[in-house]
Structure formats: structure tokens, C-alpha cells
Image (tube, rainbow, N blue to C red):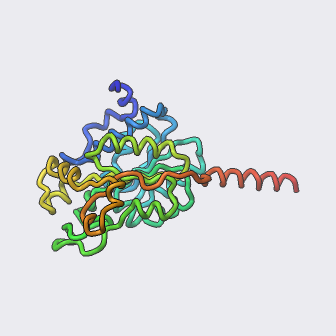
Amino acid sequence: MPRENIARFLRLGLFPHIFCAGCGHGIAFHALIRAFDALGYNPEEVMVVSGIGCSSRIPGYINANTLHTTHGRALAFATGIKLAKPHLRVVTVMGDGDCAAIGGNHFIHAARRNIDITAIVLNNYIYGMTGGQASPTTPHGARGSTAPYGFIERQFDLCNLAVAAGAVYVARATVFHISQMESFIKKALQKRGFSFVEIISTCPTQFGRRNRLRGAVEMMEWLKNNSVPLSKAKEMSDEELEGKIVIGEFADKEMIEYTELYHSLCKAAIGEGMSK
């Protein structure tokens, strides 16, 4: 892929980026803009929205329409944008705390409505930017600044939540599985309706240090060794899946999209008003 194809989606004047050494967010970021290019997108037709967090810095580096919003509200802003400008290809980039904690209700109802937004969550298992607090996706027993003796809560499975809420496309990959991750992103972007891709990108600074994963290489090896394809996971017991990352496609279906319903209703209401 020619470098200039990728460069057209970058605000090169803002580099170098702020991600910590060894962070997988840059890998996911590159996969996203490669997907934009592979699908032949024009930067002017792309809208990337984020909330607050490490991953939410990504839109600032993308040469497209971008919006950096408040914590947990990326999907709320993206919903308004999609309804006002349905021709835009709207993408949200969120972290696990951003999406699943303060933004949890927005996440559930965007999926329920099946609005045409591609939601990408970079799950680093922790609040990486604000001090290493445990998040809804912190694994049971893992350590954080608010869980110095280990997290006692059950880990939130975002893909199962997205499926249950009604998303038409749901997939999970890790930053180790680069080709699979890019393939999932491309499929999600092409899906008409609410699509969701979770990317496991463990934080080397806040999560890795507290959980004795040492450096970035060890964290990549950990992602590789602890990932299980969905087809294999279906044959494993709950005990065997404890501590594993199930990767693959969890949903791929067709449903009528919310924006289409909304605008058809508006046209019908206008027509009815004019006939009176």
C-alpha cells in the first residue's frame, strides 16, 4: 500500500503522537486508516467521534471530519451527526471505561436503535489516562490503582452486551492479530446499521506494570497465548475459558437501519402536513 494513500488520512503536523511506548493503540489506529483507504473512502465523507481517554486522542490525528467530545458521550454526539448528515460514514473511537461505564446507556441504546455507526472500542482493561483505576472490563483478579489486591468484580463482556442489545455486526480482535483486526474493521464499516468492534489493546503503563507483564513484547506474547478463536471457545468449558480472550465474529445479520426509518417518518409527516 503506497505511503501517500495512508498519509492523506493523517494530520502529519500533529505528530509525534502521545501514546506511551509499547501501547497498541497506534496499531489499531493504523488498521483503521488502512481500512478507510482499502474501502476507497474520501476523508471528506468520514466522521470520527471520540470521548475522553487515551484511545479518544486518535481522531485528532485523522485528516477527516473529527469531533472530540465529553467523557462517555461519543455515541450521543455521533447519533446527532448521523441524523443530521446521513451521508457521512460515522465512526466512534472509545475506550472501555468511556464506552461501558459512563457511556454504557448510550452504547446499549445506539445498538438497540441500530443506527448506522461503527463503534470501535480499544479495550486496555483499565483507566489508562487518569491513573490506572479498574474499569468495567478489568479482568477478575487483576490489579489497578483502585484494586491493589485484585479486582473482585466480574469482567463485563462488551461483545455479548452488543449482541444482546441488537448490534448487527459484533467482533473482537487483539492488537496482536493485526490482519484479523483490520478485516473486522472493514466489515464493520461496510455494515448498514450499528456495528461494534472490540480491540484488546492492553495498557503497558497502567495495566502491564501493575500485573507483572513487564514490557510491550511480553504483553504481545500474553495476547497471543491467551486468545482463543470463537469456534474453539464454543467447545470449551467455563473453567477452561477463565482468563482467556475469545476472538472472532459474534454477530453478522441484517436489520432495517434507524436513520432510514427516521427520515421516512419525517417525509411522511411533512406530506401529511401539506395535505391538510
Res 231 → quadrant: bottom left
Position in image of residue 270 (x %, y %): 77, 52
Q: Residue furthest front?
A: 235
Position in image of residue 241 (x %, y %): 27, 64
Q: Is residue 77 left or right of residue 139?
A: right
Residue 186 vs residue 40, the one in the foreground: 186
Q: Is residue 1 left or right of residue 23?
A: right
Residue at coordinates 41% horizontally, 63% vertically from top-left?
Answer: 160
Q: Is residue 76 left or right of residue 15?
A: right
Residue at coordinates 50% horizontally, 35% vertically from top-left?
Answer: 44
Residue at coordinates 37% horizontally, 43% vertically from top-left?
Answer: 60
Res 127 → quadrant: bottom left
Residue 137 vs residue 239, the one in the foreground: 239
Position in image of residue 99 (x %, y %): 40, 60
Q: Is residue 261 left or right of residue 17?
A: right
Q: How many marks?
A: 0
Quarter of the image containing the C terminus?
bottom right
Quarter of the image containing the N terminus?
top left
Residue 236 vs residue 45, the one in the foreground: 236
Position in image of residue 92 (x %, y %): 44, 50
* On screen, residue 264 above or below 146: above
